[in-house]
Amino acid sequence: MEFKRRFGKQRKAKPKKGLFLVILLALVLYLFFNADKIIGRYF
Protein backbone atom coordinates (compact mmCIF):
# COMPACT_ATOMS: atom_id res chain seq x y z
CA MET A 1 0.00 0.00 0.00
CA GLU A 2 2.79 2.44 0.89
CA PHE A 3 4.64 1.85 -2.39
CA LYS A 4 1.47 2.50 -4.44
CA ARG A 5 0.82 5.76 -2.57
CA ARG A 6 4.37 7.02 -3.17
CA PHE A 7 4.28 6.01 -6.83
CA GLY A 8 0.91 7.75 -7.31
CA LYS A 9 2.25 11.02 -5.84
CA GLN A 10 5.32 10.93 -8.10
CA ARG A 11 3.20 10.40 -11.25
CA LYS A 12 0.94 13.35 -10.41
CA ALA A 13 3.88 15.61 -9.54
CA LYS A 14 5.73 15.00 -12.84
CA PRO A 15 3.27 14.30 -15.68
CA LYS A 16 5.49 15.84 -18.38
CA LYS A 17 8.52 13.77 -17.39
CA GLY A 18 6.44 10.58 -17.45
CA LEU A 19 5.09 11.39 -20.91
CA PHE A 20 8.61 12.11 -22.17
CA LEU A 21 9.83 8.75 -20.85
CA VAL A 22 6.94 6.92 -22.57
CA ILE A 23 7.73 8.62 -25.91
CA LEU A 24 11.45 7.87 -25.50
CA LEU A 25 10.69 4.20 -24.74
CA ALA A 26 8.42 3.97 -27.80
CA LEU A 27 11.16 5.47 -29.99
CA VAL A 28 13.75 3.00 -28.67
CA LEU A 29 11.40 0.05 -29.28
CA TYR A 30 10.62 1.32 -32.79
CA LEU A 31 14.32 1.58 -33.66
CA PHE A 32 15.02 -1.83 -32.09
CA PHE A 33 12.32 -3.62 -34.13
CA ASN A 34 13.22 -1.81 -37.36
CA ALA A 35 17.01 -2.24 -36.97
CA ASP A 36 17.02 -5.29 -39.29
CA LYS A 37 15.24 -3.37 -42.07
CA ILE A 38 17.50 -0.31 -41.69
CA ILE A 39 20.68 -2.43 -41.69
CA GLY A 40 19.36 -4.50 -44.62
CA ARG A 41 19.00 -1.39 -46.78
CA TYR A 42 22.53 -0.07 -46.33
CA PHE A 43 24.50 -3.32 -46.01
Image (tube, helix red, strand yellow):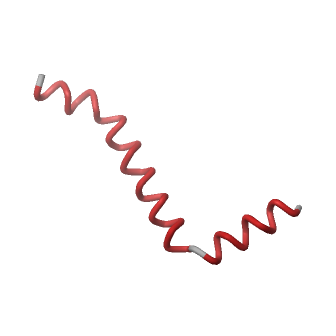
Q: Give the vertical position of 18 relative to 30 (above or below).
A: below
Left or right placement of residue 40 versus residue 30 in this view: left
Q: Quadrant of the N terminus?
A: bottom right
Q: Give the vertical position of 12 relative to 43 (above or below).
A: below
Residue ID at (38%, 45%): 28
Residue that lies at the very extreme toward the bottom in this rendered image: 13
Task: Count numbered badges in the picture.
Answer: 0
Residue ID at (77%, 67%): 6
Residue that lies at the very extreme toward the right in this rendered image: 1
Q: Position of residue 17 (x, y in %)?
A: 51, 68
Q: Position of residue 31 (x, y in %)?
A: 32, 41
The image quarter containing residue 30 is top left
Q: Give the vertical position of 29 relative to 43 (above or below).
A: below
Q: Position of residue 12 (x, y in %)?
A: 65, 76
Residue that lies at the very extreme toward the left in this rendered image: 42
Residue ID at (17%, 24%): 40
Q: Position of residue 10 (x, y in %)?
A: 67, 70
Left or right placement of residue 21 versus residue 35 in this view: right
Q: Quadrant of the C terminus?
A: top left
Residue ID at (42%, 59%): 23
Between 27 and 6, the one nearer to me in the picture: 6
Left or right placement of residue 34 versus residue 25 in this view: left
